[in-house]
Each structure stands twice: as structure tokens, then as C-alpha cells.
Image: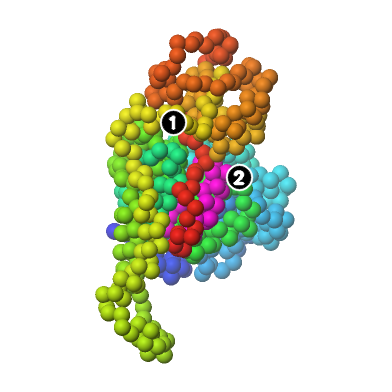
């Protein structure tokens, strides 16, 4: 393998990265650095998350910057403030031996006046999020007329987050003579379009095949009933005593709820999402990076700035809708050559989605059994014993207490002492898990015709019919939002949802039924009057067929948008519920991590 010494970097930079522990360049660094240093050309670098793209463009960038010219010469655009902060910290470390080179981070959620003051004092490199940079441009607080280098980092994610118009506006404010370097984990058509519109004959370097996963990541999935999702999460976390990872949720609300439940149940966890202030986000990230937290519960957007090399697990509390999001999520682990595990919690209906992911990523997803209580206790016990074997003994500090300890333990033989010692750790888990149910779906439960997907006869829920569906552009999140706005019933209180073409069914606790029916009375959604009523029909277990046991009732044309001729493209087909339930109130027994 090549070394950094052979890539054309100066002695000043080599000394800095050597102190940081950089030994061998990654594949993207090996190919990109010499090219960016020598060829005055636009550039596209495609490589998986966690392969060192920041150093791939950061090292040549600080070599090319003139530290004695105090106007912005390089602009790095980042999709999130967390990633922007991380980029800034990395570049400051790379350039610590370069006198007078200054870098300024600009991002939302921080004092803009202070950022303007730093820019006016002079800076050669600006690391910015699109929204805050546009604000500075409109205030005429930043001058990009002498910009020489523009770096679009995580370009695919910026487009996923809806920054295309912002990027277009920013690029229009930069000189045509600049060089543009685009780095991305994936290359969807929107990113390809940016390279066509704003770059001139770019050199392209691709590491690995398109849409492939990091070979060091083990992809697994657990099949579960949706109502057990939170319980399975706890089971998985307990099965890996030394877990250090991220749990990805789809919404800010769900992220906060899951984090609060975990904290309440004694886990070292916290949430990271867009509703937090910058001070709160910084505190959470600081605690996570120094391992005060074992679990970070995060949304896709918030987690983009996380740059931690030794994460053991990524857990998908819910699968994302897009392949790119799964790639970025799982890429948080197995960084810098380490190995990692990516675990998806799915219902039987989502198994086809996993198979599609496996096909597109050209990798295997292993279906894994949810560990039963006995296995969890066994795993915790042996982990505890391993820690006992590895504990460092401070002979000098403990010596004054040995005599008294021997007196206290006098009369207890070795075997009894070991049993008592082990039971201190084992009993706490055993009390909770000894009567815990097996959360695995049995073979016959996986059959779509099985009653697992039907409400029990004595259910406390009502199943409601509503005359809007997929052809109205309705997906699960949108339906939950409509119910919340009309009736003030939260998403976590809504159970199973079945979306059809021109109508839908959803389940709620009987105590909310009258409230929902009254809330929708006389209302109009998607351009027509809503009809909602209690249904006695059984839930469908095949989205392409009629509900099992459905009566011969026909729906009139008022149930169909525009008389049944609506050609709107349906949104997501995801039909997940929200609102994890706690397995039991076991704070008394749950061991503190």
C-alpha cells in the first residue's frame, strides 16, 4: 500500500497527520490527493461513508491555500452543522503547523453576529451549511468573489435534505474560474446533474462499486410484531453488553420518545434531532464521543455529522424509505477499517424491503433470532466474568482493606463465594428476564393469513374506515398527521394502519373513537368530504387483495377521488405504527449500564 509520504504532501502537513496517528492512506485518499494537488481540474469523488473523504479533499486544500491572503479562498458546503463542525475540527488539526491559516465555521443555531465578526477578521477557508451561508450572502457579510475552490461534501445528502435550490443560488454567486470538488457516498441522478451543470470535464474517482455496502459491515434483521418493537430494541441492547452505537428513528418525535423510554429504563442513552438547541446538541455529541452515552437515538439528518471510528452497532428502529439513507446509516459503523453490525427491526411485511436492499447493495442480510431471556442473561453473565478477569488490581491502594475483607468473608468457601459474587450481577437480569416472553414470530405467524394480523375478539381497539387512501397521495405519516390535526389524537395512540387505493383502515383505542368521528365530522380532506365509521372487517394481510372476511359491500364513487380517475402517484407504501410500548415497569430490576 502507498504511504502519505508518496502522495505529494508537504513535510509540515505530514508531521501534523503523523501526530494524529495517520499511517496509511485509504483508497479514496490515495487516488484523490495527488490528483487534487497537481491537476487544476474539477473533481468527483465517490466513496462509501467512513472512508476518509474529509482528509481526501482537506489535505490538498490546505496545501493549496495561501495563508497570507485573508479573503475566502475555499468554501466547503456541508448538509448539517454537526458535519460542518467535524470538518472544521479535522482541517484545523491537519493545518495546525501552518502559520496564519484561518478557518471559520458558519451554521444555523449559533450567533450570526459572532460568525460575521470572525469572517471580517479574515479567513481563507469557510465551512458552511447552505441556509446560513445564503443568509450571510444576502446580508453582504461574506465576499466569495475571489473563491478558488468549492467543495460539496456529502452532496447526495444535501439534495436529499432539499438543498438543491440553495446550492444553485450559492453556486451562482461564486466565480466561474473556481474549481469544484464534489464528494458523495452515492451518485443519484440529481448529483450527476449538478456535476453536468456546474463542473467542466471533472476527473472522477470511484472507490468500490456503485450501491455496494462496506464489506466490514454485517447486515442483520430481526422479524417482530410491530407492538414489540421497543421491547426487541431493549432485548438486542441487553444481548450486546458492550454496545456502542446509534439507533436511527424516522421522526424527531419518535426519536425523543424512544430515547426517553430508554433513559427511564436505566440505559445510558440520549436523543439527537433537529428540535434541540445547538447547546443541547453539542452536549449530547460530547457525551456520546467520550462514551458517557452508550446509545445515541438519532434522526437521519442529525446523525450526518457523527464521525466516530469505533461504533459497534447501528440499529434501524425503522427502515428508511431510500437506499441512500440506509447506506449512510449503516456506514456510521465499520469505519477506519473496523468491523460493525447493522441491525434492522422489521415486521413480516417489510421483509421484501430487506430483500430489495440486499439486491441493490449486493450483500447478504442475515435473518437473526431475537434472543430469549435466558440467552440474554447468559451473555451478560459471561461479559461480567470477562471484565472480572481483565480488571486492573491496584495492590497498593487495596492493601489496607484486605485484612478486614478476609475477616468478613471468613467461613465462606471458594465455591459459595463465586456463586454469591456472580449472583450480584446475574440476579438483576434474571429477575426481569426469567418470565419474559419469546418475541420471535413463529413459523405460522409469518403466514399472511394467520390471525397475528387480526384484532383479537376482545380487543380494546376499534377499527375505523376512512374514505381517503393512496390515490389521494396519502401515506402513513400523512394520515397520522391528518388525524392529529383534526382530532388531537397523537400518532402513538393509533395502532395498525391499512392503506388502500381510495380508502384506508386504522385502529385506535375505543376511548378515542367518538373523539375521532366527531373531529372529522363535516371536514374535507384532499378535496372531498371525509366519511369515517367503525368497521367490523378484518385487516388485510395482502395489499393486493380484499381484506380477509370482508363483506360484499361496494363503495360508492364518492369514496373515490375525482370519481375514481385520480392519477396521483402514491407516496410511501410504509405502514408502520408509531409509539413503542414498554415491556414492563422494571426500573427496580434493570441494571445500570
Residue 86, position as x, y percentages in the image: 52, 57
Is 208 placed left or right of 193 in the picture?
left
x and y percentages locating residue 489 in the rendered image: 62, 35
Return the residue nearer the eye: 19 or 235. 235
Image: 438 above or below 449:
below
Characterize the local packing of mark 1: few (<14), some (14-19) or many (20 or more) Cα atoms within 10 angstroms.
Answer: few
User: Is residue 321 in view?
Assistant: yes
Q: Secondary structure at mark 2?
A: helix
Looking at the image, residue 159 lies above or below residue 590:
above
Residues rendered magenta in the picture = 244-271
Residue located beneath label 1 in the image = 456
Residue picked out by circle 2: 130
Task: Please tell me the numbered disc located at residue 527.
Answer: none
Q: Which colour scheme appears in the figure?
A: rainbow
Residue 214 in the image: state x and y as whole percent. Answer: 34, 48
Question: Of marks 2 and 1, which one's residue comes earlier in the chain?
Answer: 2
- Crowding at mark 2 (Cα within 10 Å: few <14, some 14-19, many 20+): many
Q: Residue 552, relative to residue 376: is it above or below?
A: above
Side of 167 where 421 appears, left or right: left
Q: Residue at x 54, y 62 (%)?
A: 286
255 or 523, nearer to the observer: 523
Q: Would residue 568 appear left or right of 140 to someone viewing this image?
A: left
Q: In percent of the image, x 70 and y 56: which residue is there?
A: 111
Mark 1 and mark 2 in contact (Cβ < 8 Å)?
A: no
On whether residue 264 falls in the magenta region, the answer is yes
Q: Residue at x 49, y 21 (%)?
A: 536
Residue 208 in which image quadrant: top left
Image quadrant occupied by the N terminus: bottom left
Amino acid at each position: 500500500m502507498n504511504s502519505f509520504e508518496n502522495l505529494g504532501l508537504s513535510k509540515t502537513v505530514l508531521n501534523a497527520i503523523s501526530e494524529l496517528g495517520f499511517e496509511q492512506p485509504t483508497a479514496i485518499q490515495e487516488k484523490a490527493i495527488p490528483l487534487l494537488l497537481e491537476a487544476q481540474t474539477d473533481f468527483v469523488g465517490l466513496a462509501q461513508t467512513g472512508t476518509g473523504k474529509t482528509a481526501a479533499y482537506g489535505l490538498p486544500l490546505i496545501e493549496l491555500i495561501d495563508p497570507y491572503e485573508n479573503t475566502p479562498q475555499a468554501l466547503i458546503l456541508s448538509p448539517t452543522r454537526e458535519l460542518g463542525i467535524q470538518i472544521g475540527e479535522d482541517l484545523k488539526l491537519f493545518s495546525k503547523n501552518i502559520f496564519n491559516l484561518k478557518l471559520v465555521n458558519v451554521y444555523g443555531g449559533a450567533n450570526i453576529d459572532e460568525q460575521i465578526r470572525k469572517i471580517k477578521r479574515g479567513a481563507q477557508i469557510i465551512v458552511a451549511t447552505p441556509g446560513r451561508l445564503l443568509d450571510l450572502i444576502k446580508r453582504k457579510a461574506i465576499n466569495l468573489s475571489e473563491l478558488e475552490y468549492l467543495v460539496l461534501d456529502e452532496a447526495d445528502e444535501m439534495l436529499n435534505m432539499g438543498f438543491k435550490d440553495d446550492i444553485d443560488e450559492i453556486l451562482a454567486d461564486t466565480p466561474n474560474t473556481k474549481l469544484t470538488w464534489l464528494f458523495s457516498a452515492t451518485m443519484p441522478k440529481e448529483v450527476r446533474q449538478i456535476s453536468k451543470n456546474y463542473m467542466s470535464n471533472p476527473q472522477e474517482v470511484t472507490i468500490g462499486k456503485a450501491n455496494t455496502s462496506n464489506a466490514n459491515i454485517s447486515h442483520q434483521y430481526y422479524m417482530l410484531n410491530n407492538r414489540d418493537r421497543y421491547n426487541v430494541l431493549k432485548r438486542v441492547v441487553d444481548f450486546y453488553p458492550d454496545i456502542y452505537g446509534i439507533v436511527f428513528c424516522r421522526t424527531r418525535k419518535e426519536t425523543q420518545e424512544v430515547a426517553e423510554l430508554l433513559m427511564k429504563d436505566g440505559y445510558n442513552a440520549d436523543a439527537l434531532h433537529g428540535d434541540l438547541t445547538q447547546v443541547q446538541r453539542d452536549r449530547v455529541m460530547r457525551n456520546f464521543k467520550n462514551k458517557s452515552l452508550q446509545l445515541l437515538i438519532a434522526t437521519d439528518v442529525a446523525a450526518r455529522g457523527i464521525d466516530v471510528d469505533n461504533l459497534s452497532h447501528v440499529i434501524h428502529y425503522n427502515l428508511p424509505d431510500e437506499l441512500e439513507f440506509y447506506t449512510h446509516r449503516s456506514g456510521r459503523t465499520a469505519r477506519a477499517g473496523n468491523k460493525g453490525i447493522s441491525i434492522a427491526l422489521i415486521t413480516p411485511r417489510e421483509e421484501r424491503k430487506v430483500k430489495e436492499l440486499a439486491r441493490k447493495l449486493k450483500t447478504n442480510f442475515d435473518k437473526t433470532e431475537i434472543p430469549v431471556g435466558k440467552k440474554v442473561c447468559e451473555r451478560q453473565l459471561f461479559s461480567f466474568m470477562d471484565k472480572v478477569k481483565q480488571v486492573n488490581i491496584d495492590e497498593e491502594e487495596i492493601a489496607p482493606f484486605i485484612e478486614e475483607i478476609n475477616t468478613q468473608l471468613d467461613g465462606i468457601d471458594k465455591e459459595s463465594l463465586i456463586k454469591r459474587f456472580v449472583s450480584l450481577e446475574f440476579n438483576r437480569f434474571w429477575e426481569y428476564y426469567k418470565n419474559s416472553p419469546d418475541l420471535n414470530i413463529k413459523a405460522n405467524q409469518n403466514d399472511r393469513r394467520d390471525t397475528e394480523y387480526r384484532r383479537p375478539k376482545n380487543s380494546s381497539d376499534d377499527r375505523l374506515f376512512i374514505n381517503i387512501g393512496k390515490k389521494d397521495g396519502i401515506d402513513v405519516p400523512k394520515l397520522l398527521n391528518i388525524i392529529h390535526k383534526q382530532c388531537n389524537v397523537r400518532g402513538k395512540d393509533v395502532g395498525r394502519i391499512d392503506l388502500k387505493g381510495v380508502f384506508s383502515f386504522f385502529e385506535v383505542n375505543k376511548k378515542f373513537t367518538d373523539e375521532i368521528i366527531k373531529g372529522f365530522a363535516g371536514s374535507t380532506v384532499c378535496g372531498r368530504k371525509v366519511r369515517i365509521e367503525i368497521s367490523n372487517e378484518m385487516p388485510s394481510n395482502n395489499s393486493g387483495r380484499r381484506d380477509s372476511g370482508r363483506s360484499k359491500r361496494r363503495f360508492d364513487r364518492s369514496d373515490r377521488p375525482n370519481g375514481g380517475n385520480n392519477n396521483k402517484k402514491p407516496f410511501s407504501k410504509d405502514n408502520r405504527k408509531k409509539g413503542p410500548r414498554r415491556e414492563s415497569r422494571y426500573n427496580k430490576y434493570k441494571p445500570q449500564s
